[in-house]
Amino acid sequence: MRGGARLAALYAVFALIATAVNIGCQAVVIWAYHGPYAVPLSILVGTGAGLPVKYLLEKRHIFGFESEGLAHDGKLFVLYSVMGVVTTAVFWGVEFAFSHLYGTDAMRYVGGALGLTIGNLIKYQLDKRYVFVAPAAPLAEAA
């Protein structure tokens, strides 16, 4: 498999893994809790579980990025998370739309998977351009 195809396949596999973690956690919350705000709570828990999984897999295997330590890694995760705010809004919007239009958990999960797919395509471009980039070389001092 060529470089670009291999990268796309890995990214897809990692997105599927994170999606499975996300949707699985949502299903557990819905199974365990039937009270008010069960759906938003399940989406929040799913997102909170899937995000670090995706970050760790992508940082290492997609971008081949090594942080400079725990503090740097924390800053990267925050930046990675901030980049995900817009893409999470896309994901949530599609999931809530499916929930509203179809009114079933199964279709809400389909909407969640579709929203995550769209969000992942956008997220890759943002991360490549703004998160997992080599630090700029210091300017040479003037002589």
Image (cartoon, rainbow, N blue to C red):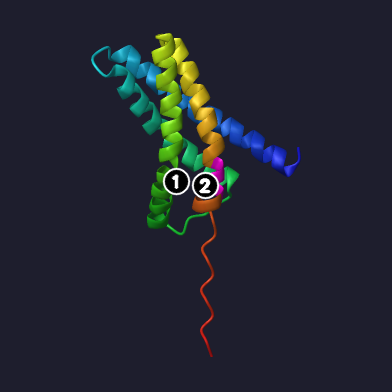
Task: Compare marks 1 and 2 and give the one earlier in the sequence.
Answer: 1
The quarter holding residue 106 reads top left
Q: Where is residue 114 in the image (x, y as percent from the top left)?
A: 52, 23
Q: Residue furthest left?
A: 36
Residue 99, compared with residue 13, is above or below; it is: above
Residue that badge 2 annotates: 127
Front-most of residues 13 and 35: 35
Q: Is the magenta stretch mostly helix, strand or loop?
A: helix
Residue 73, compared with residue 124, is above or below; it is: below
Give the amino acid at mark 1. Tyr
The quarter holding residue 29 reads top left
Judging from the image, what secondary structure is the residue with disc 1 in?
helix
Q: Distance between the residues labelled 1 and 2?
A: 7 Å
Front-most of residues 19 and 61: 19
Judging from the image, what secondary structure is the residue with disc 2 in?
helix
Front-most of residues 93 and 76: 93
Q: Position of residue 13 (x, y in %)?
A: 59, 31
Specify whether 77 is left or right of 126.
Answer: left
Residues at discs 1 and 2 in contact (Cβ within 8 Å) = yes
Specify whether 29 is left or right of 93.
Answer: left
Based on the picture, tell me whether residue 108 belongs to the magenta stretch.
Answer: no
Query: Quarter of the image containing the C terminus?
Result: bottom right
The residues colored magenta run 124-128
Q: Residue 26 carries which label?
A: none
